Amino acid sequence: MAQISTARLRPPACRVDPRSLVLWRVRLTVGGSAAVVGSWGLVSLLTAVRSPWPWVGLCALPALAVAAVLLLPRWWFRLHRWEVTGTAVYVRGGYLRREWGITAMSHIQTVEILRGPLQQRLGLATLVVTTASPKGELRLHGLDATTATELAERLLALAQATPGDAT
């Protein structure tokens, strides 16, 4: 008989590391700067110098970029959460749309730790839990690197100790 999981969708308890705010702000600053410079260059190539309207619109771009850098990471920090229990991994995140994920321990196939250059500099990591589902994976963003390593080891032990579904 198949084991029925007691996992249910609920808000995860753990917040991401506060250093994630720095990571997100740097990424937004780089992306916003590239968008502003690219837009200015494109408009200067495609419009006549005597037409002021494209330039008026472009003057709003730096203000929008600054607002995004200041406001979006705070919102994302409140939104992104994670938790690991004895039966499941819970993740809540998303940027423009809210995403919830839950995976039973018996469905975990692999666990990876990702650390880009900026994450390494800030001491952060992303834990990727791969499952057999069509979605394929859950990502726990903004973890302290040490926490990510300990969590990966804990998930491995829990997944090995949890009997798989017999279906």
Image: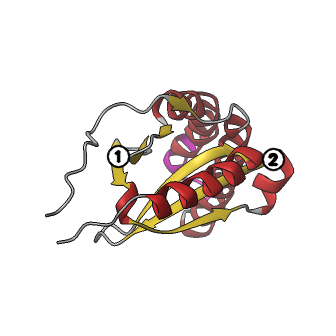
Q: Amino acid at mark 1?
A: Glu
* Residue at the (61%, 69%) spot, across then down: 45
Q: Is residue 160 visible?
A: yes
Name the residue carrying label 2. 123
**Marks 1 and 2, how far apart at CA:** 25 Å
Say which label, 1 or 2, has the lower sequence index: 1
Residue 22, picture quadrant: top right
* Residue at the (27%, 39%) spot, across then down: 9
Residue 92, picture quadrant: top left
Mark 1 is surrounded, within 10 Å at the Cα level, by few (under 14), some (14 to 19) or many (20 or more) other residues, namely: few
Q: Amino acid at mark 2?
A: Gly
Q: Which residues are magenta?
A: 49-56
SS state under label 1: strand
The colouring scheme, among rainbow, by chain, secondary structure or one colour, is secondary structure
Towards the viewer: 131 or 99: 131
Tell me the tag on residue 99.
Answer: 1
Residue lying farthest to the right in this orientation: 121
- Percent across and percent down for residue 101 are 35, 49
- Percent across and percent down for residue 164 are 32, 66
SS state under label 2: loop
Residue 24, picture quadrant: top right
In the displayed structure, 75 sits above or below 49; it is above
* Residue at the (24%, 49%) spot, across then down: 5
| Quarter of the image that includes the C terminus | bottom left
Towards the viewer: 65 or 23: 23
Mark 2 is surrounded, within 10 Å at the Cα level, by few (under 14), some (14 to 19) or many (20 or more) other residues, namely: some
